[in-house]
Amino acid sequence: QVKLVESGGGLVQAGGSLRLSCAASGRTFSRYAMGWFRQAPGKEREFVAAIAWRGSSTDYANSVKGRFTISRDIEENAGYLQMNSLKPEDTAVYYCAAGLTLNSGYGYWGQGTQVTVSS
């Protein structure tokens, strides 16, 4: 069993930065890939970024490449999403998740944290 809790969301102006954190409990978290997803009002949830359980591989949505960086600290049982050069279209609820692979099997989800980017 893995429990995930996100934090770090907030209100920021366009061009600003935020760092989201995902605190995990459960001794098996280190064996899962970790992903970040987001859902904007009226839209479906979409993939943002993912990192393999060893941190050797990462993947990003085209819309955030070069602006967002995903990382994880296995010893701290935590994951992070550094978001730079934020745009109003990045406004959404951001969720972290634990999955079997980078792109599939996400069975554990956090409750989400709101990110609002003002223009």
Image (spheres, rainbow, N blue to C red):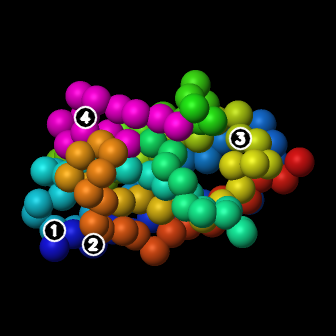
Question: Quick check: marks 1 and 2 in contact, CB under 8 Å?
Answer: yes
**Mark linked to residue 26:** 1
Name which residue type carries label 1.
Gly
Residue topped by disc 2? 3
Determine which quarter of the picture holds residue 91. Answer: bottom right
**Dots 2, 4 in contact, CB < 8 A:** no
- Say which residue appears at 79% left-offset and 48% top-offset: 88
Q: Nearer the viewer, residue 9 or 104?
A: 104
Give the mark nearer the N terminus: 1 vs 4.
1
x, y (%) of residue 26? 16, 68
User: Could you say whether the residue bearing mark 2 is in a helix, strand or loop?
Assistant: strand
Magenta region: which residues?
A: 50-61
Instruction: Count residues near mark 3 (Cα–Cα under 10 Å), then give few for <14, some for 14-19, many for 20+.
Output: many
Tell whether 1 sits left or right of 23. Answer: left
Q: Label 4: which residue? A: 55
Amino acid type at circle 2 is Lys
